[in-house]
Image (cartoon, helix red, strand yellow):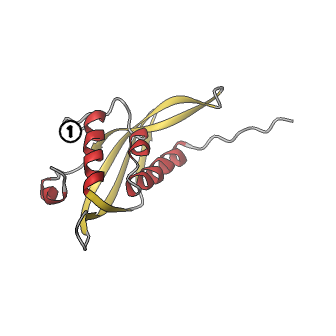
Amino acid sequence: MRTALRQPSDRERILNLIADGKKAVESKDIGSTMALISPRYNDDFGNSKDDIRAYAVAYYREVSALRLKLSRPSISIKDSTALVDLDVTLEVTPKGWLTSKLISTQVTLVLEKKPVRRMLIIPSAKWQVVSIRMPSLRDYEEFLPE
């Protein structure tokens, strides 16, 4: 007898993406971080996926520790697009510092669902970040790599 493989709901997939993103950032894992971002990424500041990769590599080198605190996300899904609103607090310990600094902001993740195959044959779906909307980071320039 065949056992049907349960497909997670879109909401479950999105919550997993957020958890995976938190883990990737906190461990400063550039490969895992970038796997969550769509090749079609483009934000209000004109950044592409390549720009985000370069920024993340530089940022991960500049800090000795990163910790994220995320609020419960508000998720709105329509067809293959989702908006995720959440409050983010980033605790940053720059290299050479004994203390941490906190950066808090409200973020909207714009996600896109794309079809994928599990085990090469089972149709599934994967959500990726296509844009991040947030206030300007000018208030936090002292914590950003040059």
- Work out whether 103 lies above or below 33: below
Q: Which residue lies furthest to the front in this view?
A: 96
Does 114 sit left or right of 57 as displayed?
A: right
- Work out whether 74 lies above or below 50: below
Q: Which residue lies furthest to the right in this view?
A: 1
Instruction: Say which quarter of the image contains residue 117.
Output: top right
Residue 133 appears anywhere in the view? no
- Quickly name the residue at label 1: 44
Quadrant of the drawing holding the N terminus: top right
Instruction: Say which quarter of the image contains residue 67.
Output: bottom left
Residue 46 appears anywhere in the view? yes
How many numbered dots are placed on residues in this image? 1
Instruction: Say which quarter of the image contains residue 54.
Output: top left
Q: Which residue is drawn at 34% across and 29% down?
A: 40
What secondary structure is found at the residue carrying circle 1? loop
Residue 115, position as x, y percentages in the image: 52, 28
Residue 103, position as x, y percentages in the image: 24, 63
